[in-house]
Image (tube, grey):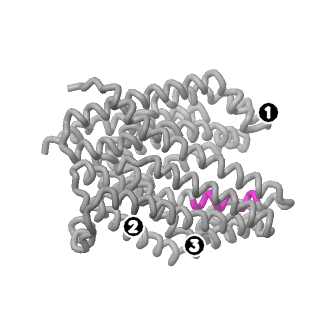
C-alpha cells in the first residue's frame, strides 16, 4: 500500500538532507585550495604528486566506506527501537573495528604505496613526490577511519548538522594548515599531506565531543559484555563484509570506465575526466537524500512502524527525484558553460560537449540507485546490496565490451546508464524484503 507522505515528512527529510549536501560541497572547495596552494609552487611535479597521492587515498579509504554505512544502519535501528544501551554498544564496536582496520593499514603501508606507484604510469619525480605525500598522510589513517564511524553515528541518530559541523571544521583546518605548512614553512608536498592528517585528528576531537554530548543526552550505559558480544561482532563483520564487497565492485566499475576511456586516446580520456565532474556534482545532492533515507528507514524498522516506513521512503524518494530533474535541467541549460569552466582545451571541450546528452539524462536514471542504496543501508540488507551490485556489474561489463566497440566513448556512457538502471532494478526487485522487516 502506498502512503501519501505528510508535509512534515518532507520537512524532516529536507532537515536531514541539507547539512549532508553542504558537507559534500565543502569537499571540492578543499580540493581547489590544495590545487591552488601547491599549483603556485615552481615545480609542476608537486601538483602531479599531490593529485596521485590523493587518488591513492581516495581508493584506499573508499574501500572502508562500510564503517560509515554499517554504523548508520545499526545505530538508526537501535535508536528507532529505543535501545539506548545498544546505540552505545554499536558506537564502541564501530570504533574498535575502525582501530583494527587502521592498524592493518599502518602495518602494510609500505607495500601499499609500492604497489600503487608501480600501477600508475608517470614520471619518477611524480612517483617520488606521491610516495612522500603518502608516507606523511598515512599516519592520519586512524583518524580518517574514526571519522567514517562518527559520520555513520551522526547520520544514524539523525543529527546531520553535527556531521556538517565536523566536516566543515576539518576542511577549514585543512585549508589553514595548507597555507601555514606550504606557503609559510615551504614544506610543499609533505605540507599538504601533513595538513590533511592533522585536520583529520582535530575533526575526531570535535566529532567525538559532539557524539559524547549526544549520548549524554540520550542516556543509557556502556555494557562491556554487549560491546564485546561475539554474536553482535559477527553480525557487524558480516554486514560490513558484504558492504565492503559491494563498495570494491563499485570502485572497480568506475576505474574500469576510466581505463576503457583511456583506450580511446588522450583527448577522449581528458574529456571523460571533465565529464566525470558532472557525476560528482550530481552525487552532492542525491547523497543527501540517500543519507536521510538511511536514518529514517532504520528508525522506522527499529520501531516496527510499517506506515512510517512507507511514508519516509515515499517522501525521500519524491524529493530525490525532484532534485534529479533539477540536475538534468541544469546540465541541459548550462552544460557547455560548465565544460568551458572545467577546461580551456578546445578539442577536449568539443568531445565533452558530445557527452552532454548522456550527462543530462544520467541523474534521472542514477537517482534510483542512490535512493535504494540509502533504503537498504538503513534496513541493513547488505547481502542484497552486494548481490545487486555483482549482478549490475556483470551486466555493465558485458555492455562495455559490445557497446564501446560499436559506438566508442558513447558506448561507455550508455553502459554507465545501464549500470545505474541495473543497480536500481536489482534492489527494487527485493524491496519487499525490507517491508517485511517491520512485520517480524
Can you give x and y, in whole percent of width and height, for residue 23 in the image?
54, 46
Question: Is residue 421 something that shows in the picture?
Answer: no
Q: Are marks 1 and 2 in contact (CB under 8 Å)?
A: no
Q: Residue at x 39, y 63 (%)?
A: 212
Image quarter hosting the C terminus:
top left
At mark 3, the secondary structure is helix
Q: Which residue is mark 3?
A: 139
Q: Hey, which residue is sitting farthest right in the picture?
A: 42
Identify the image quadrant of residue 188: bottom right
* Neighbour tally class for label 3: few under 14, some 14-19, many 20 plus, Cα within 10 Å: some
> Going from the N terminus, do you reach mark 1 or mark 2 first?
2
- In this view of the protein, which residue sits in the foreground, 262 or 405? 262
Do we see residue 31 in this rendering?
A: yes
365, 193: nearer the viewer: 193
Q: Could you tell me residue 105's position as x and y percent?
A: 50, 71
Horizontally, residue 439 falls left or right of residue 426, namely: left
User: Mark 1 to mark 2: distance in Å?
Assistant: 49 Å
Q: Which residue is mark 1?
A: 346
Is mark 3 in CB contact (under 8 Å) with mark 1?
A: no
User: Which residue matches tag 2?
Assistant: 95
The quarter holding residue 58 reads bottom right
- Image quarter where the N terminus lies is top left
Left or right of 254, for residue 92: left
Q: Earlier in the sequence, mark 3 or mark 1?
A: 3
Q: CA distance from mark 3 to mark 2?
A: 17 Å
Amino acid at each position: 500500500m502506498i502512503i501519501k507522505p505528510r508535509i512534515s515528512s518532507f520537512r524532516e527529510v529536507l532537515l536531514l538532507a541539507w547539512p549532508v549536501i553542504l558537507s559534500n560541497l565543502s569537499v571540492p572547495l578543499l580540493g581547489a585550495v590544495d590545487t591552488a596552494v601547491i599549483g603556485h609552487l615552481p615545480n609542476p611535479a608537486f601538483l602531479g604528486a599531490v593529485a596521485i597521492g590523493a587518488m591513492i587515498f581516495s581508493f584506499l579509504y573508499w574501500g572502508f566506506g562500510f564503517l560509515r554505512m554499517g554504523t548508520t544502519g545499526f545505530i538508526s535501528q537501535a535508536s528507532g527501537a529505543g535501545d539506548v544501551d545498544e546505540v552505545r554498544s554499536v558506537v564502541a564496536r564501530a570504533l574498535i573495528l575502525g582501530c583494527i582496520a587502521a592498524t592493518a593499514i599502518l602495518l602494510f603501508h609500505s607495500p601499499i604505496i609500492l604497489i600503487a606507484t608501480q600501477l600508475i604510469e608517470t614520471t619518477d619525480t611524480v612517483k617520488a613526490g606521491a610516495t612522500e605525500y603518502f608516507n606523511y598522510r598515512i599516519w592520519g589513517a586512524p583518524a580518517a577511519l574514526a571519522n567514517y564511524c562518527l559520520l555513520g553515528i551522526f547520520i544514524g541518530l539523525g543529527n546531520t548538522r553535527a556531521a556538517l559541523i565536523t566536516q566543515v571544521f576539518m576542511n577549514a583546518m585543512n585549508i589553514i594548515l595548507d597555507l601555514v605548512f606550504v606557503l609559510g614553512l615551504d614544506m610543499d608536498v609533505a605540507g599538504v599531506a601533513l595538513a590533511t592528517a592533522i585536520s583529520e585528528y582535530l575533526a575526531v576531537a570535535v566529532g567525538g565531543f559532539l557524539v559524547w554530548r549526544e549520548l549524554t543526552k540520550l542516556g543509557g550505559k556502556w555494557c562491556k559484555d554487549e560491546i564485546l558480544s561475539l554474536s553482535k561482532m559477527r553480525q557487524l563483520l558480516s554486514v560490513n563484509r558484504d558492504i565492503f564487497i559491494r563498495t570494491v565492485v563499485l570502485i572497480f566499475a568506475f576505474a574500469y570506465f576510466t581505463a576503457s576511456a583511456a583506450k580511446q586516446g588522450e583527448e577522449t580520456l581528458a574529456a571523460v575526466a571533465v565529464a566525470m565532474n558532472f557525476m560528482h556534482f550530481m552525487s552532492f545532492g542525491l547523497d543527501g537524500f540517500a543519507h536521510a533515507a538511511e536514518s529514517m528507514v532504520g528508525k522506522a524498522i527499529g520501531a516496527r512502524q510499517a506506515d512510517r516506513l512507507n511514508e519516509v521512503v515515499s517522501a525521500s524518494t519524491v524529493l530525490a527525484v525532484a532534485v534529479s530533474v533539477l540536475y538534468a535541467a541544469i546540465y541541459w541549460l548550462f552544460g557547455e558553460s560548465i565544460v568551458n569552466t572545467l577546461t580551456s582545451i578546445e578539442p577536449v571541450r568539443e568531445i565533452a560537449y558530445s557527452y552532454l546528452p548522456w550527462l543530462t539524462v544520467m541523474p534521472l536514471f542514477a537517482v534510483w540507485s542512490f535512493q535504494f542504496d540509502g533504503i537498504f543501508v538503513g534496513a541493513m540488507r547488505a547481502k542484497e546490496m552486494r548481490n545487486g551490485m555483482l549482478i549490475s556489474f556483470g551486466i555493465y561489463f558485458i555492455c562495455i565490451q559490445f557497446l564501446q566497440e560499436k559506438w566508442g566513448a558513447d558506448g561507455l556512457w550508455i553502459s554507465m546508464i545501464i549500470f545505474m538502471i541495473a543497480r536500481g532494478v536489482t534492489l527494487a526487485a527485493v524491496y519487499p524484503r525490507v517491508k517485511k522487516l517491520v512485520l517480524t
